[in-house]
């Protein structure tokens, strides 16, 4: 009985992972291959208390990785001045929205912004943190995953238990 319930729970967790990868990819703009490679299912084992878990582990994804950043420097602005950009900041795509990040520029291939008046404390701007997309209640994946669990989990577990009892 417990083994059948664990099979149903694990089947649900695998489907929950698959749907989460699609949802996270579509809302963030990060390719599904990257999201899928960082998302794992910790399967339940037959016991009195069973728990399966969908887990994502990744670092903050820099804007430069999937955001196609652009920053144009104007080499001769005004009356023979030095190199200054006429853009408000670097332009990049994050969460499927193309926008300019005020005060940002591109250095060594990364979208960065100064954190103080000094020349070198630079902060690399990032877009999605995949673990947050999977766990934060304010992100669209969490309510969708809860709704799917309410709809699907019981049916899958009962189907496996009935199959085990009748066969």
Image (cartoon, helix red, strand yellow):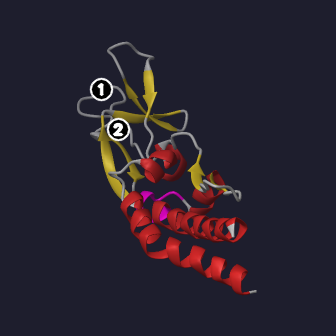
- Residue 116 occupies quadrant: top left
Magenta stretch bounds: 25-30
- The answer to whether the residues at label 2 and label 1 have Cβ atoms under 8 Å apart is no
Does 145 sit left or right of 97 as displayed? Answer: right
Residue 148 in magenta stretch: no
Pick out the residue farthest to the right: 167
Mark 2 closeness class: few <14, some 14–19, many ≥20 residues within 10 Å = some
Whichever of labels 2 and 1 marks the residue nearer the N terminus, that label is: 2
Q: Position of residue 98 (x, y in %)?
A: 35, 55
- In front: 147, or 156? 156
- In front: 133, or 119? 133
Q: Position of residue 108 (x, y in %)?
A: 55, 33
Report the disc number at residue 111: none
Instruction: Give the vertical position of 166 relative to 52 (above or below).
Output: below
Pick out the residue farthest to the left: 78
Pick out the residue farthest to the bottom: 166
Residue 60 makes an appearance in the image: yes
Give the residue at x 50% y 41%.
62
For mark 1, give the secondary structure. Answer: loop
Residue denoted by label 2: 74
- Residue 142 occupies quadrant: bottom left
Report the disc number at residue 81: 1
Q: Main secondary structure of the magenta part?
A: helix
Does 7 sit left or right of 131 as displayed? Answer: right
Q: CA distance from mark 2 to mark 1?
A: 10 Å
Q: Position of residue 70 (x, y in %)?
A: 42, 47
Q: Position of residue 93 (x, y in %)?
A: 40, 53
């Amino acid at each position: 009985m417990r083994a059948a319930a664990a099979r149903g729970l694990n089947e649900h967790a695998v489907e929950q992972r698959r749907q989460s990868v699609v949802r996270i990819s579509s809302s963030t703009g990060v390719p599904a291959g990257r999201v899928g490679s960082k998302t794992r299912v910790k399967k339940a084992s037959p016991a009195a208390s069973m728990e399966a878990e969908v887990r994502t582990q990744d670092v903050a994804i820099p804007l430069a990785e999937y955001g196609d950043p652009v920053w144009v420097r104007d080499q001769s602005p005004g009356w023979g001045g030095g190199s200054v950009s006429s853009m408000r900041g670097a332009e990049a795509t994050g969460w499927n929205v193309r926008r300019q990040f005020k005060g940002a520029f591109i250095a060594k291939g990364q979208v960065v912004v100064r954190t103080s008046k000094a020349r070198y404390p630079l902060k690399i701007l990032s877009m999605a943190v995949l673990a947050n997309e999977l766990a934060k209640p304010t992100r669209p994946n969490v309510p969708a995953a809860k709704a799917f669990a309410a709809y699907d989990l019981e049916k899958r577990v009962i189907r496996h238990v009935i199959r085990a009892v009748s066969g």
